[in-house]
Amino acid sequence: MRLLTFFILYSSLFIIASCDNAREHTAEAIRDEDSVAMMTSYGVNTLISDSGIMRYRIIAEQWEVNDNRNPPRWIFPRGLFLQQLDEKFHVETYIQADTANYFTTNKLWHLWGNVRIKTVDGMIFTSEELYWDQNRHELYSNLYSHLITPERELEGAFFRSDEHMRHYNISNTKGAFTREDFENGNDNGNGNGNGNVNSNDTTPKRQAATPRPR
């Protein structure tokens, strides 16, 4: 009987001691960069609508939809090729970049790495970074940008344009200009819009300047 009582007492003390030494195993809080995408697709070729109308075709090797990040976004970590369509599904603009994010709440694109835009009018834009604000319907870049049109070639430290690349502005420009640029101070174009040289720009020489290397 004493042996049984001793065994029960010893077992109770062992259980109490074990509870005192127990540790709660918890993981660290999830950080923003650890948030898992809600959907990941590979080999994407799809149409995207805007206000109920098909406006864009997205072609990408990988597409992640992540609403857990703040702000929510689409991520294209392996490059993006985007076609902008008109009402008749004709391609107006081609856009490509090495990497891209689309912030769904703000309707803002952020593209970087070998960003290139080509329009059906023959305009070619290149830079290392570009923002596309779909709410304001404008494109802009704070990095060196290079623009080639059928009439001239420009480059500068800041670029802003409407999303159709018909009205644009480049700051601190240098490049090749036409005679009308010096007589009128702006580009009346060929029916595709106006290209303006900012009043604070470097005064261009009459002979074509050699574009600086990228």
Image: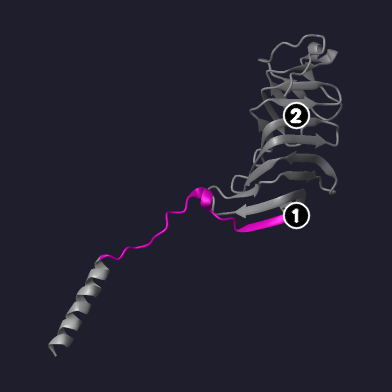
Give the farthest residue toward the top.
206
Q: In the rendered structure, which segment of residues is drawn in magenta?
A: 21-46
Which is more toward the observer, 148 or 52? 148
For residue 178, which quarter of the picture? Answer: top right
Q: Determine the residue positioned at 69% across, 36% down.
A: 113
Q: Determine the residue positioned at 24% across, 66% down.
A: 20
Question: Does any portion of residue 86 appear in the rendered image?
Answer: yes
Judged by depth in the image, the label closer to the viewer, 2 or 1, is 1
For residue 146, which quarter of the picture? Answer: top right
Mark nearer the N terminus (2 vs 1): 1
Give the farthest residue toward the bottom.
1
State the scheme by which the image is colored. Answer: one colour
Question: Which residue, given by chain and number where applicable, does mark 2 sit on?
Answer: 167
Q: Would you place residue 161 above or below residue 57 in this image?
A: above
Which is more toward the observer, 124 or 4? 4
Which is more toward the observer, 33 or 38? 33
Rendering coords of residue 182 (x, y %): 79, 11
Which quarter of the rendered picture does the N terminus lie within? bottom left
Which is more toward the observer, 183 or 105? 105
Q: Is residue 36 magenta?
A: yes
Question: Which residue, given by chain and number where applicable, does mark 1 sit on?
Answer: 43
Rendering coords of residue 172 (x, y %): 68, 18
Helix or strand or loop: what does disc 2 sit on? loop
Q: Is residue 187 magenta?
A: no
Amino acid of disc 2: His
Amino acid of disc 1: Gly
Q: Determine the residue positioned at 84% across, 12% down.
A: 179
Q: Would you place residue 134 above or below residue 23 in this image?
A: above
